[in-house]
Image (cartoon, rainbow, N blue to C red):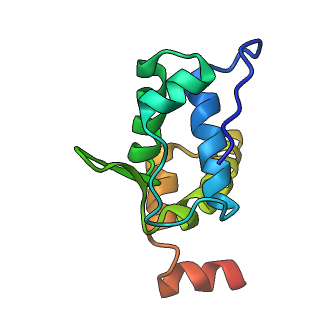
Amino acid sequence: MLLRIDPTRDEPVYAQLAASIRADIAAGRVVAGERLPSAKDVAGSLDVNLHTVLHAYQVLRDEGLISMRPGRGAVVAERGAAVAILLPRIARLAAQADELGIDRETLASLVRDAGTEDIRKGTSE
């Protein structure tokens, strides 16, 4: 896994790290059960603060892409690849909902009910 950051970009370094790992998971370069490099190793190799790397790992944990356990480190979650593939699609859907004036609560409800018969009937007409 090759982590890349560009300190000249406006995007925070932690977000760049998270995006790099997310892309590797989505592309299958890092697979479920695989351990990520320790935050200390990443910080040292990229010459960034340890807390910056930990922040990136926490973002990925909150997204369900990795799990973090004391003594075991950060490990790609079983459903990590599927989540990584869906995240950009969800972001586009959320942006479209914003453009249409649909609030997040309504959008979440629509997504939750998307598999129900009533919703499918409404989209096929």
Q: Quadrant of residue 18?
A: top right
At 70% across and 49% down in the image, what residue appears?
92
Percent of width and height locating residue 83: 53, 61
Choose between 119 and 50: the one closer to the eye.
50
In the displayed structure image, the side of residue 10 where residue 14 appears, left or right:
left
Percent of width and height locating residue 70: 22, 44
Q: How many marks?
A: 0
Whether residue 93 can be seen here? no
Quadrant the C terminus occupies: bottom right
- The residue most toward the left is 70
Reply above or below: 31 against 116: above
At 56% across and 67% down in the image, what residue appears?
82
Reply above or below: 6 against 100: above
Whether residue 44 can be seen here? yes
Choose between 106 and 70: the one closer to the eye.
70
Percent of width and height locating residue 84: 59, 57
Reply above or below: 105 against 25: above
In the displayed structure image, the side of residue 82 where residue 34 appears, left or right:
left
At 64% across and 48% down in the image, what residue appears?
1
Reply above or below: 44 against 4: above
At 52% across and 54% down in the image, what residue appears?
107
Percent of width and height locating residue 71: 24, 46
In the displayed structure image, the side of residue 34 where residue 67 appears, left or right:
left
Q: Quadrant of residue 51?
A: top left
